[in-house]
Structure formats: C-alpha cells, structure tokens
C-alpha cells in the first residue's frame, strides 16, 4: 500500500443546468435568485468541508484545527474562484457549473492506529457527503415546522428548495468513485491490493473523466441522479403537508 503523507478533501460540484440556470436579464428576481443560490452554495460547501475537518480531527489529526478549518464559518471554507466566481459565471453564461471549496488538508499518518490510513481517509472522505445528508434532513424538518406554523413565503420556499437540491447534488456527486472526489478515496479503501492499478488509473485520469462527465455527460448524470431528486422532491411535499 502506498504511503500517503498529506491528503486534501474538497468537493467538486457539477450542477446540470437547468437546475441553476438563470435568465440573463439582471432583473430584481434574477439577482435575488442568484443571491439565494450563492448563499446556499457557500453554506453547503462550508458544512461539507467542516465535516471533513471534524472527522480528521476525531481520528487524531490536528492539522485542520491548526489551519483554522474546524469551524462552521462558511467563509473560512469558501474558495474565491470555485465558490463565488465560477458559479456566477455559470449562472450568467449558461455553462455547466463546476465549483469547489478550499480543500481540507489532513495527514493520514496522524490517524489513530485502530484503523488503516486508507480506511481513515475513507472515513474523512465520507464525512463530507454525510454532512450534506444531515443538511437535507435539517431542511426538511425546518420546512415541516414552518409549513405548520407561520407558513412558507415564496422567497423562503426558494431558499429551502435550493438548499435541498444543492445538498442532494453535493452528496451524490461527491460519492462518484472518481478522484479527486470523495468517492475515489472511499473506493480506494475497499479495493483489494490486486486492483491497486485501478486506483492508480483513477488518480491519473479521474479528473479528465470528471470533466468529460460535466461537459458531455449531462444526460447520463441526469439519468443517474434524477430518481433521487424525484424522491427528495416528494419528501419535501410530504414535509410541508402537500
């Protein structure tokens, strides 16, 4: 097994447009929609990265805390280009969205010896998508409470639905078994030694495969992820009593 001195965990996010496509008219409604989307994106990536940092810290690596990443402050985890500029460009131009947060650095050699370094990396990797799953559950709960008390205004509904869509997407997309996504690190932990060449291949070409999926594989991604979005949409309808 190859030694890994430093690992970095950061989400790569693709959104099949029309999920986040906006008309380029710069009206008040459009600007509000873009603003809500950016708020949800920054918050969702922040939780995703915080969960990576928390898992690494619990496994015994103090690197995330030393670098100030053990916080839910989303600004700390935001990347100026990947979290702000790229989403705005994608929204205005209609290009597919590829965004990311600041990767969380961790040193697997500091993990507890109760598990292997690869398994530790898999645990840290899985923590990000789990954080997004918890946000999905939290949003559904908030929607249920609001619907049964003060009601849900149109802006609040847009905020809740955007948070749901983004976090489902972050969770599922990052679980694809490709490097540099979280799913690539999870797959590496469970591959038998005789299949290590598969991991080597994905380390070398995973990013190119990922770009190909983003640019040319929108239909395939839609078919793979679409059923989950349908299920979550139905859960939202049930939550609000529809």
Image: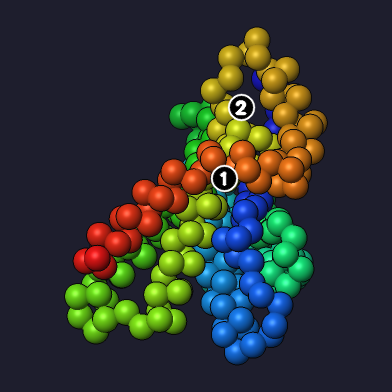
Q: Which residue is mark 1?
A: 222
Q: On screen, 61 above or below 195?
A: below
Can residue 51 be seen from the camera position used here?
no
x 44%, y 43%: residue:
227
Q: Position of residue 105 (x, y in %)?
A: 66, 50
Marker disc for residue 188? 2
Q: Quadrant of residue 241?
A: bottom left
Q: Quadrant of residue 81?
A: bottom right
- Disc 1, SS: helix
Q: Position of residue 198 (x, y in %)?
A: 70, 20
Q: Name the front one of labels 1 and 2.
A: 1
Q: Position of residue 211 (x, y in %)?
A: 76, 44
x 60%, y 73%: residue:
38
x 40%, y 81%: residue:
154
Name the one closer to the observer, 150 or 130: 150
Q: CA distance from mark 1 to mark 2?
A: 25 Å
């Amino acid at each position: 097994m190859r030694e890994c001195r430093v690992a970095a965990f950061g989400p790569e996010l693709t959104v099949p447009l029309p999920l986040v496509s906006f008309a380029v008219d710069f009206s008040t409604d459009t600007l509000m929609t873009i603003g809500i989307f950016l708020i949800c994106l920054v918050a969702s990536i922040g939780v995703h990265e915080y969960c990576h940092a928390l898992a690494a810290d619990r496994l015994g690596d103090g690197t995330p805390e030393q670098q100030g990443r053990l916080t839910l402050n989303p600004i700390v985890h935001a990347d100026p280009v990947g979290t702000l500029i790229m989403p705005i460009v994608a929204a205005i131009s209609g290009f597919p969205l590829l965004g990311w947060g600041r990767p969380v650095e961790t040193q697997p050699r500091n993990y507890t010896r109760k598990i292997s370094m690869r398994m530790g990396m898999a645990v840290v990797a899985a923590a990000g998508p789990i954080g997004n799953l918890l946000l999905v559950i939290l949003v559904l709960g908030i929607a249920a409470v609001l619907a049964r008390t003060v009601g849900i205004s149109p802006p609040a509904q847009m905020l809740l639905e955007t948070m749901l869509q983004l976090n489902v997407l972050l969770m599922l997309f990052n679980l694809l078994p490709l490097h540099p996504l979280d799913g690539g690190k999870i797959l590496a932990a469970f591959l038998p030694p005789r299949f290590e060449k598969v991991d080597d291949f994905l380390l070398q070409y995973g990013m190119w495969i990922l770009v190909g999926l983003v640019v040319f594989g929108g239909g395939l991604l839609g078919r793979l992820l679409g059923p989950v979005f349908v299920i979550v949409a139905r859960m939202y309808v049930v939550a609000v009593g529809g």
